[in-house]
Amino acid sequence: MNFPERRKATRFKGKLPIEPEQGTGLTRDFSALGVFFETDQSLTVGEPIKFVIPLIYSDWGHPFRVRFQGEVLRVEPTGGKIGVAVVVHSYSFEGIDEREQA
């Protein structure tokens, strides 16, 4: 059965490290409006969430991180991990000092 696409933004598949306030994870896909990632941490639908995606290699010539704030939309088991869908409410960019990379 085919369902019509309801997403409002293009989704990109990709595995990027993600750092929620508790634990770590790896993205499965992301868009301008949301992120789906897998983690070992238990989260609850409706709870606010903050997380960071560090981007060590960039066209800007230096590493930076993106800080996100959002809300957990869906939680599901995914092969021994927990899949978490998040709607993004806001984000900001900040540089990563070279000393932090070591």
Image: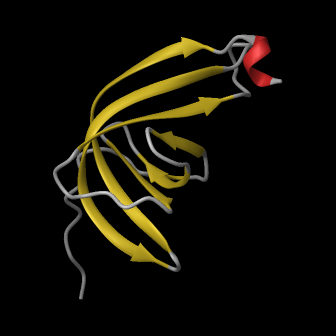
Residue 50 screen position, x and y as percent: 36, 34
Residue at (37%, 47%) from the top-left corner?
10
Residue 53 screen position, x and y as percent: 54, 35
Q: Residue furthest bottom?
A: 1
Residue 35, compared with residue 90, is above or below; it is below
Q: Is residue 18 left or right of residue 61?
A: left
Q: Residue furthest left?
A: 46
Pick whichever, 16 or 76, lies toward us.
Answer: 76
Residue 27 screen position, x and y as percent: 52, 52
Pick whichever, 93 or 7, lies toward us.
Answer: 93
* Occupied quadrant, residue 18: top right
Q: Is residue 30 left or right of residue 64?
A: left
Q: Is residue 58 left or right of residue 65?
A: right
Residue at (45%, 45%) from the top-left corner?
22
Residue 71, compared with residue 56, is above or below; it is below
Q: From the image, which quarter does the C terminus lie in?
A: top right
